[in-house]
Image (cartoon, grey):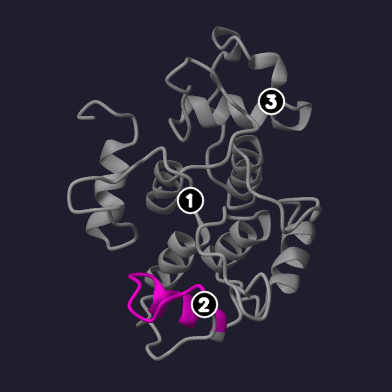
Amino acid sequence: PANAWYLEDVMQASEQGLVSGMSEAFFEPKGTMNRAMFATLLYKLEGAAGSEGEGYFEDVAPGAWYAGAVNWAYENGYMNGVSAERFAPGSTVTRQQLWMVLARLTEFNPSNMTEAQHWAVESKISDGSNPGGALTRQQMVTILYRWAQQMGYDVSGRADLSAFPDNASVAAYATEPMTWAIAEGIISGTTEGLLNPAGTATRAQFAVILYR
């Protein structure tokens, strides 16, 4: 929509080649950020060319739009398959994958997910638990909030969560980061007017993170 909170950042991220639409006409901002999208986003951040060839996984067709990025992410140790044969391109993004991106944005270059996990713990970005778990909205904003603090960014913005009927469902650890994320427009209420803290992070939210 023309008045969407994320529109300007999505457009900027698209112009910089960090994200693209699901089709020529649609971005699907509320669609879940899956592994195929995340692999493509990673290699675009790196300015790398996708690795061509037959690939490594049975569920990644050589002609798929994300195939080159998946091959590159696997070859460089950023992402592994869920098994020796499957990449699961439609599965959701995990906590450790966000750790990897933020570590690289701070110019620390972990060679694998274990190093990214250690970085996240040592930097107090995350407790390092459940690395393979899908990233929820409250986990995403908490990790991002702590990272912004480490980087010395202004995180003083606060919003009143009482306007959201499900505000009591926000975990204690995520309350302050959530007030900041709402104030900064990093996330907003759902179409039902809820915070939905346990919901999975979306494409629009990742585009905002990347641009900002």
- The image quadrant of residue 208 is top left
Mark toward the start of the polypeptide (1 vs 3): 1
124 lies left or right of 144: right
Tag 1 residue: 33
| Residue for point 46% across, 31% down | 184
Q: Give the magenta part as a residue range.
A: 59-74
| Residue for point 37% across, 88% down | 52
Q: Which mark is residue 76?
A: none
Tag 2 residue: 73
Mark 3 residue element: helix
Q: Is residue 44 above or below residue 28?
A: below
- Residue 23 percent across, percent down from the top left: 24, 53
User: Of the residues shown, which amino acid type is indicated by label 2?
Assistant: Ala
Q: Which residue occupies the extreme bottom position in the image?
A: 53
Tag 3 residue: 175
User: Of the residues shown, which amino acid type is indicated by label 3?
Assistant: Thr
- Measured in 3D between alpha carbons, the distance from the residue under mark 1 to the one under mark 3, in whole angstroms, is 23 Å
- The image quadrant of residue 54 is bottom left
The magenta stretch spans residue 69? yes
201 lies left or right of 83: left
User: Of the residues shown, which amino acid type is indicated by label 1?
Assistant: Met
Mark 1 residue element: loop
- Measured in 3D between alpha carbons, the distance from the residue under mark 2 to the one under mark 1, in whole angstroms, is 16 Å
